[in-house]
Image: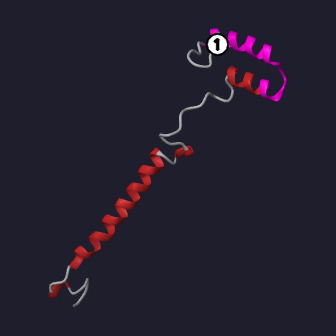
Amino acid sequence: MQTLAHFGDGGPGPWILFFPVIWALVIGGGIALLRRTMWRGRRGPWRTEAVADNSPITVLGHRFASGEIDEDEYWRRLSVLDEQFGRTGKGAAA
């Protein structure tokens, strides 16, 4: 009987099925790796974690941007929040 590419006549035999399985595992592993690292939540190693949307500093920034408070009130409140939450470095109010 001549099956699997003429196994009895010196063909590759059942080993010919091994290579598509290997390629399927390689492609599936690559996709799984990408999903676990870069594609989850559309974030990647190039993006930094942002401040939470409901943090007091973010809410204050949104209120200032929408015109609810003026610049003086924004800086006054930001200085209080900086003391309370300990935001330091560049951009911190003194």
Residue 27 lies, with reference to residue 47, above or below; the image says: below
Q: Residue furthest bottom?
A: 1
Residue drawn at x 82%, y 19% as measured from the top left: 70
**Between 6 and 29, the one nearer to me in the picture:** 29
Residue 79 within the segment the image draws in magenta: yes
**Magenta-colored segment: predominant secondary structure:** helix
**Between 83 and 23, the one nearer to me in the picture:** 83
Please provide percent x and percent y for residue 80. 69, 9
35 relative to 12 in the view: left or right: right
Please provide percent x and percent y for residue 29. 38, 55
Residue 19 within the segment the image draws in magenta: no
Residue 40 lies, with reference to residue 29, above or below; the image says: above
Colouring convention used in this rendered image of the protein = secondary structure
Please provide percent x and percent y for residue 73. 79, 14
For residue 16, what is the image quadrant? Answer: bottom left
**Between 69 and 27, the one nearer to me in the picture:** 69
Please provide percent x and percent y for residue 24. 37, 65
Q: How many marks?
A: 1
For residue 52, what is the image quadrant? Answer: top right
Residue 16 lies, with reference to residue 7, above or below; the image says: above
Residue drawn at x 82%, y 29% as measured from the top left: 66
Residue drawn at x 40%, y 55% as measured from the top left: 30
Q: Residue type at mark 1: give it.
A: Asp
The residue at which mark 1 appears reads as: 82
Q: Residue furthest right?
A: 68
Range shown magenta: 63-85
3 relative to 37 in the view: left or right: left
Residue drawn at x 58%, y 19% as measured from the top left: 90
Label 1's element? helix
